[in-house]
């Protein structure tokens, strides 16, 4: 159970995945990236 003042690592991971998921695949797995339809999320 998180205590007061502990960083929220789960939320940070979710933000990173949302922001960089497409870029990650395009950089490291370009042939796989063509299989996905990446959506713009605001």
Image (cartoon, grey):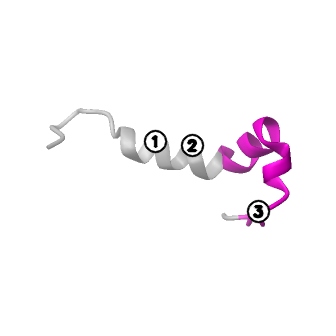
Residue 28 lies in the magenta-colored region: yes
Give the number of the mark in front: 1 or 3.
3
Residue 34 is situated, as x and y percent measured from the top left of the image, at 85, 57
- Give the quadrant of residue 20: top right
> Would residue 2 be found to the left or right of residue 25 on screen?
left
SS at badge 1: helix
| Of residues 25 and 16, the one drawn nearer to the viewer in this rendering | 25
Residue 5 lies in the magenta-colored region: no
For disc 3, the marked residue is 36
Report the Cα–Cα distance between label 3 and label 2.
Answer: 18 Å
Residue 25 is situated, as x and y percent measured from the top left of the image, at 74, 45
- Give the quadrant of residue 16: top right
Label located before the other in sequence (1 or 3): 1
For disc 1, the marked residue is 12
Q: Does the residue at mark 1 contact the one at mark 2 (Cβ under 8 Å)?
A: yes
Q: Name the residue located 37 percent from the left edge and 38 percent from the top edge.
A: 9
Q: Name the residue located 73 percent from the left edge and 66 percent from the top edge.
A: 39
Q: Does the residue at mark 3 contact the one at mark 2 (Cβ under 8 Å)?
A: no
Span of residues in magenta? 20-40
Report the Cα–Cα distance between label 1 and label 2.
Answer: 6 Å
């Amino acid at each position: 159970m998180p205590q007061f003042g502990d960083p929220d690592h789960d939320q940070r991971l979710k933000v990173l995945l949302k922001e960089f998921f497409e870029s990650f695949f395009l950089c490291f797995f370009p042939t796989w990236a063509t299989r996905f339809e990446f959506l713009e999320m605001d």
